[in-house]
């Protein structure tokens, strides 16, 4: 206060106006005399809280003013109270504060101070192993690999307090996806460095938790150092903590050197279940201290694909599954591939084959085979082959396609494999706007009686195997049988005779043997597949349309 003060100070008051999103803890209000370093007793002032106007006014007692606010003196006080930002405050709220000093009829405002809100924007991507190839919104198949990539934003460095917790929580759809926990990684996006070892990682009940490790933390108020270890044992519990559960005087913080950049958390998933028309979605949540923000949502429709098998006597014939086939007759195993949907998460098809292990005790492959297009085969908007058209097989001229689309191989165990060539794989991979499917026929001959004869094939697409249904047939034994029986007369038994042709007529009193021959022929079953096709003929007819 100036020595030449023209008037006596009789009123001293302080009015503090705080932000509407600030919730004061009124019992923490205290006033300290900075000259003596002692608290000013509450008897020397009264406090008036105005919740509607978000303000508190302190009016000092007359005795205190007369003793301390004199001309030529230097009164110094500090008023302190605590509070928290309201939980429902908008994430982008700037919390400000200003106070004013009243001396008699004069009001002098202070400067305004503020606190920026936590500024972080987490993000999420859904990609192939190559992070540059997004598959968000693309159709995923059983066995496909989905990589969830979460952008953990830690660029902000001007925090009012040390960051004690930084991490993310991802509640993935564990009914349809399986997390490869051992391959979760954390990468510094600024330099590409792997920093996974600086984070604690756990997967608990279908939820992934990735949090920065706590470190030895110095506490300036006490001069002590709090040990960072042991690390949180249960990250599910750790993720549920709030600011009230963290004591900065007792609990360690994370390494503050982690701040100033962003991190990519990669969660590799595998599709383990598919349901038609089901869409698997995912959103992660980033945590910075007690503030939580959700990422954007990514999604993948799921599509079940299943190969199918049948047995017929001609390409366009009816199914004889469960029926009988003549011995030595010819028939066809029909091998329907899966139908690949358009707009796939993985349009590139690296391998596509069907392997059919024949039961060589009953079936012999004749070497005749054929492949038909089950969907239009399209290249650059031009239809190369229409649905139902033959595109490969025995004695087929594939020159109009620029080469063979399929090849066939057999082995000594009786496995017949029909495999798409690189040319066919290229056509399938390039066309992402249409369904893709094909049907193969392999001709066999039934070489033994018996049954049931079961057959099932395995389809392989991009290394993922899918079994077909099983078909069964029977081949009854239709060989004629001759039965011989004897009938003896009642005449007395005669001494044994030497081997000689049988007499032409019976003599009284002698042994009479009647030879009866019965010719037994098994009846033809009601449901028989009557095929007498030549072994050298190949399947040529148009196949039945497949849904």
Image (cartoon, rainbow, N blue to C red):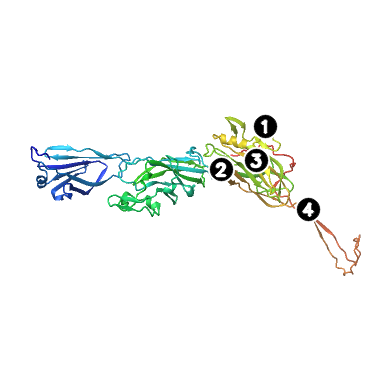
Residue 8 position within the rendered picture, expressed as x and y whole percent measured from the top left: 8, 40
Name the residue rendered at 62%, 33% in the picture. Answer: 386
Compared across the picture, whether 382 is left or right of 94 comes to right
Toward the left, the furthest residue is: 7
Name the residue rendered at 87%, 69% in the picture. Answer: 493
Mark 2 residue crowding within 10 angstroms, few (<14) / some (14–19) / many (20+): some
Q: Which of marks 1 and 4 is nearer the N terminus?
A: 1
Mark 1 residue crowding within 10 angstroms, few (<14) / some (14–19) / many (20+): few
Q: Label 3's element?
A: strand
CA–CA distance between discs 3 and 4? 37 Å
Foreground disc of the pair 3, 4: 3
Q: Label 1's element?
A: helix
Q: Earlier in the sequence, mark 2 or mark 4?
A: 2
Q: Earlier in the sequence, mark 1 or mark 2?
A: 2
Residue under numbered circle 3: 440
Q: Earlier in the sequence, mark 3 or mark 1?
A: 1
Residue under numbered circle 1: 399
User: Any mark on residue 305, and which?
Assistant: 2
Above-or-below relation of 482 to 68: below
Residue 257 position within the rendered picture, expressed as x and y whole percent measured from the top left: 37, 44
Compared across the picture, whether 525 is left or right of 55 comes to right
Name the residue rendered at 25%, 46% in the picture. Answer: 83
Residue under numbered circle 4: 480
Foreground disc of the pair 1, 2: 1
In which quadrant of the rendered view does residue 308 lie?
top right
CA–CA distance between discs 1 and 4? 51 Å
Foreground disc of the pair 1, 4: 1
Q: Which of marks 3 and 4 is nearer the N terminus?
A: 3
């Amino acid at each position: 206060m100036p020595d030449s003060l023209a008037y006596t100070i009789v009123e001293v008051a302080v009015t503090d106006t705080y932000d509407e999103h600030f919730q004061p803890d009124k019992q923490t209000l205290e006033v300290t005399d900075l000259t003596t370093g002692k608290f000013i007793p509450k008897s020397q002032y009264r406090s008036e809280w105005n919740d509607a106007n978000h303000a508190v006014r302190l009016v000092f007692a007359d005795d205190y003013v007369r003793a301390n606010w004199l001309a030529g003196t230097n009164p110094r006080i500090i008023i302190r109270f605590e509070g928290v930002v309201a939980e429902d405050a908008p994430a982008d709220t700037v919390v400000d504060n200003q106070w004013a000093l009243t001396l008699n009829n004069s009001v002098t405002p202070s400067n305004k101070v503020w606190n920026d809100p936590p500024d972080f924007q987490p993000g999420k991507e859904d990609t192939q192993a190559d992070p540059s190839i997004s598959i968000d919104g693309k159709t995923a198949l059983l066995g496909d690999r989905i990589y969830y990539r979460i952008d953990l934003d830690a660029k902000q460095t001007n925090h009012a307090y040390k960051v004690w917790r930084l991490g993310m929580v991802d509640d993935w759809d564990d009914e349809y996806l399986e997390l490869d926990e051992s391959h979760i990684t954390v990468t510094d996006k600024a330099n590409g460095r792997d920093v996974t070892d600086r984070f604690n990682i756990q997967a608990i009940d279908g939820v992934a938790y990735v949090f920065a490790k706590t470190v030895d933390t110095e506490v300036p108020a006490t001069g002590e150092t709090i040990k960072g270890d042991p690390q949180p044992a249960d990250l599910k519990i750790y993720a549920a903590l709030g600011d009230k559960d963290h004591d900065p005087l007792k609990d360690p913080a994370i390494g503050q050197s982690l701040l100033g950049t962003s991190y990519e958390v990669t969660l590799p998933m595998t599709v383990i279940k598919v349901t038609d028309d089901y869409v698997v979605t995912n959103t992660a949540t980033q945590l910075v201290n007690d503030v939580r923000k959700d990422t954007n949502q990514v999604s993948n429709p799921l599509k079940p694909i299943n190969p199918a098998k049948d047995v017929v006597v001609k390409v366009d014939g009816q199914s004889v599954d469960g029926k009988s086939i003549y011995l030595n007759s010819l028939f066809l195993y029909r091998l329907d591939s899966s139908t690949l949907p358009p707009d796939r998460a993985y349009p590139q098809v690296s391998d596509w084959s069907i392997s059919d292990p024949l039961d060589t005790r009953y079936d012999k492959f004749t070497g005749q085979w054929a492949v038909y297009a089950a969907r239009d085969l399209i290249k650059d908007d031009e239809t190369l082959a229409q649905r139902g058209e033959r595109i490969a097989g025995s004695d087929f001229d594939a020159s109009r396609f620029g080469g063979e689309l399929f090849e066939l191989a057999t082995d000594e165990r009786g496995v017949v494999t029909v495999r798409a060539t690189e040319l066919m794989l290229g056509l399938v991979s390039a066309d992402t706007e249409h369904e893709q499917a094909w049907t193969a026929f392999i001709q066999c001959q039934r070489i033994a009686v018996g049954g049931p004869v079961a057959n099932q094939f395995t389809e392989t697409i991009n290394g993922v195997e899918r079994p077909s249904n099983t078909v069964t047939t029977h081949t009854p034994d239709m060989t004629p049988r001759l039965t011989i029986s004897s009938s003896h007369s009642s005449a007395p038994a005669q001494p044994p005779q030497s081997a000689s042709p049988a007499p032409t007529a019976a003599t009284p009193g002698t042994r009479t043997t009647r030879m009866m021959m019965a010719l037994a022929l098994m009846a033809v079953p009601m449901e028989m597949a009557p095929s007498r096709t030549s072994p050298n003929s190949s399947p040529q007819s148009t196949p039945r349309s497949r849904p």
